[in-house]
Amino acid sequence: MPKEIFLVELWKRYADQADEIRVKRYDKYVKLKARLKKYLYVIKLPPEWANSILEEYKSKGKTIIEF
């Protein structure tokens, strides 16, 4: 069962440990999903914030999968 996170800094801690980051884009928001061994941590963000976070993790070399 996925766990929804509401704080960006907390989600980033999980994303640093994640095997991959999944992205699902909707009209009004973007869902970022950090896949760890046991759980999937999800956060919903405005597209501008999500794009800046994705650029940060792309530069770190994380695997990003967009749906």
Image (cartoon, rainbow, N blue to C red):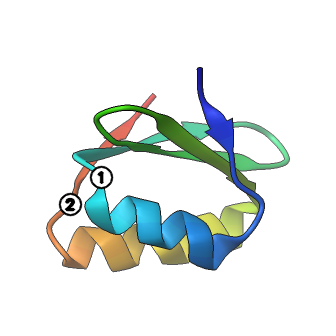
Q: Image point 77% across, 60% down: which residue?
A: 6
58 to 63, vertically: above or below: below
Q: Image point 37% across, 32% down: which residue?
A: 38
Q: Which mark is residue 62?
A: 2
**Crowding near the residue tagged with mark 2, few <14, some 14–19, many ≥20 C-alpha atoms within 10 Å:** some
**Residue that lies at the very extreme toward the left in this rendered image:** 61
Three-letter code for the amino acid on which mark 2 is drawn: Lys
Name the element at disc 1: loop
28 to 48, vertically: above or below: above
Q: Earlier in the sequence, mark 2 or mark 1?
A: 1
Q: Position of residue 57 (x, y in %)?
A: 32, 71
**Crowding near the residue tagged with mark 1, few <14, some 14–19, many ≥20 C-alpha atoms within 10 Å:** some
Residue 36 in which image quadrant: top left
Name the element at disc 2: loop
Residue topped by disc 1: 18
Three-letter code for the amino acid on which mark 1 is drawn: Ala
Residues at marks 2 and 1, CA–CA distance in whole angstroms: 8 Å
Q: Position of residue 30 (x, y in %)?
A: 67, 48
**Residue that lies at the very extreme toward the right in this rendered image:** 28
Judged left or right of residue 6, residue 30 is left
Q: Is there a contact, CB below 8 Å, between mark 2 and mark 1?
A: yes
Judged left or right of residue 52, residue 61 is left
Judged left or right of residue 21, residue 24 is right
Q: Nearer the viewer, residue 33 or 40?
A: 40
Q: Image point 56% across, 64% down: which residue?
A: 11
Residue 27 in which image quadrant: top right
Q: Position of residue 56 (x, y in %)?
A: 36, 79
Q: Quadrant of the N terminus?
A: top right
